[in-house]
Image (cartoon, rainbow, N blue to C red):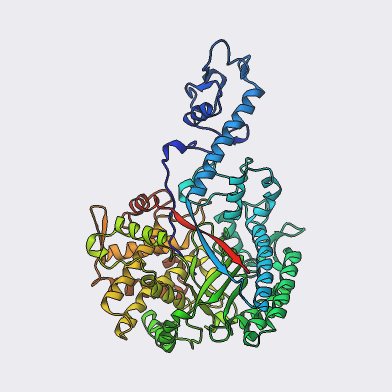
Amino acid sequence: MRPALIAFTLLPAVAFAGPKKNVEQYGLPALPRDAFNRLAIQADLPLFWVDDRNKDQKVDPGELQATGQGKPLAPFVARGKLTPRFERAYRQLVELRRREAVRRELDAGRPTILHTDFSGAPPQDKALLREILAAAKIVEQIYWKQTGAAAHLRALRRSDPASQMLFWRNHGPWCQSPATRGDRFCNALPSFPPRRSGAYPDDLAQDDKLCKQLQADADAKQLLDPFTVVRKGRDGKLIAVPYNRVFAREMRMVAGRLKAAARAVARDPKEKALERYLLAAAAAFESNSWGDADEAWAAMSSQNSKWYLRIGPDEVYADPCQQKAGFHVSFARIDPNLLSWQKKLTPLRSTMEHDLARLIGKPYQARKISFHMPDFIRIILNAGDSRHPMGGTIGQSLPNWGKVAREGRGRTVVMTNLYTDPDSRRIATEKARALLDPKSMRYYSPDPSADLINIILHEATHNFGPHSDYRVKGKVPKEIFGGKVASTLEELKAQTGGLWFLQLLHRKGMLDKTQLYRAYTAAITWAFSHISRGMFSPSGNVQPYSQLAAIQIGSFMQDGAMTFNRGRFTIHFDRLPRSIERLMATVGKIKATGDRAAAEQLIHHFIAPKGRGHRLVHEKHIAKKLLRYPKGTFVYSVVY
């Protein structure tokens, strides 16, 4: 998957400072002194916290002064102790601070509408829409159980509208944007529940230690199966439980909706491929066996259906160990306007696979490649794991596992109706100008077509070379490298391979020099945007796209293909192809040989420890320049 460029509103950090440590008062995040005094004014509370004399970051009775006349301190302090009235007032201030953080998180996104009007569509199309939209709502329920959000739904009913919107947008009460990263007060619920995935036992710490424990377990193959959750058996041993047992009710409901959708499209003789997929997907939701659904889905294309639908569990990025597949729905119409690229690239599939195999070298051998070159689609609705809190996926190659993936028969799509609005184009240009020198900026274009070829090649490259289901000594990448490293490596391979294949298209006359340089520039600005998000999520999880972007920019800087001077980067287009090829050969060899030590060394060479910036990547400078810009948060409007 290749996600979209993402940036966030950056508000002044001083006004929102939090405690340096996870200090609590009354079981709540402790308010810093400046926040206490500022919020006390807002709440008309006659108190002033004079000084944190004992440096414990908590309010103590002797540290308070009244701001009125007479003895206004008396209701809050009695016999040298804080009273219950003070506790109520303190909780009120914490709630004010929490709501500030919620608004800040919401302001990090800029609402962008995706509107589709089917009011004039034939009856079978409207029937299909009703069933898929209903199935999407149920998939959201499954996904919220996966993320752990479902456990907090009852508490959400008593929350304010802004917090309810944050919960819906973020698939849970937890904040996501760099603007609120590290802000302990940013939560949709006043109880401040910690992030806990529903995929693992609730009494185990969901950290790297757990991920390594699963990988080292004697039953690792079962425990790491992407279509299971991990639970404790009666003897305390970790066991894998299939999705159709854990989410049995919801999965049966989705299956029913898909069967109804199949009956609707059966009236259209041109939609036999979609009908077969709907029935196969319904069976998969009942059995948790996804191979037949993948076969039916791979058999669909822009040539035999006007619709695009993918429904089921696929990507693992939201999972703490990046092992468990998240349920999602991507529903779209085929966009026939860009099929010329499909026709150009399809004859090159074998050449691309063999060229990459030669670059990687032994032990990798070229495979027979028969996947579809990208279809172009216009998104109608995303749900579950496909509905991102901010931004949206603009390219995807699936499936990630199974026979279809192993045999290179997957399907690749590019979403063509995202980021085409005037606001998105304007902001993208401003961001590029903030980081590129005038010489490099000459090759920047806000036209989405400038980035289109990169998206196409990124998704295609997922199907070339050692892929996500490629085996070394019988083990797949997530067993060899661990889920987090495997995810970063696969996306690094796809993005770097896409850049490497640009030279092939240039040699074939499909791209002239200006188009080639524009594609390079678009890819580098894409990398800048992901670097600005940080290498780790707010929960401390790896962000594969940010890490691959840092590895690329760091490599280009190290090779002299890019330089940095006076706050701006210069792209040396004559040196860039060699640097791309060197990185592609390195990544390909690591994946082909299963060299975990080399993989970790490559990542650690360019990914600085948490909170620091790598000297070659200039992370802090990039973040400072880009995080001031809001990013589109997609909202969906479907009329039928």
Q: Foreground residue, 620 or 442?
A: 442
Name the image quarter holding residue 321. Answer: bottom right
**Residue 464 in sight here:** no
Q: Foreground residue, 7 or 349?
A: 7
Q: Foreground residue, 630 or 174?
A: 630
Q: How many marks?
A: 0
Task: Please say if 112 is above or below 522.
Answer: above
Name the image quarter holding residue 419. Answer: bottom left
**Residue 128 in sight here:** yes
Name the image quarter holding residue 328. Answer: bottom right
196 left or right, relative to 540:
right
Q: Which residue is drawn at the image coordinates 23% and 52% (left, top)? A: 566
Q: Which residue is drawn at the image coordinates 42% and 43% (left, top)? A: 11
594 left or right, relative to 383:
left
Question: Which residue is outermost to the front?
Answer: 120
Task: Please say if 113 is above or below 279.
Answer: above
Q: Quadrant of the C terminus?
A: bottom right
Q: Position of residue 451 (x, y in %)?
A: 38, 70
Q: Position of residue 148 (x, y in %)?
A: 65, 54
Q: Position of residue 585 (x, y in %)?
A: 36, 75
612 left or right, relative to 117:
left
Question: Which residue is outermost to the top?
Answer: 70
Task: Please say if 171 is above or below 394.
Answer: above
Q: Position of residue 31 (x, y in %)?
A: 53, 32
Q: Which residue is drawn at the image coordinates 60% and 75% (left, top)? A: 309
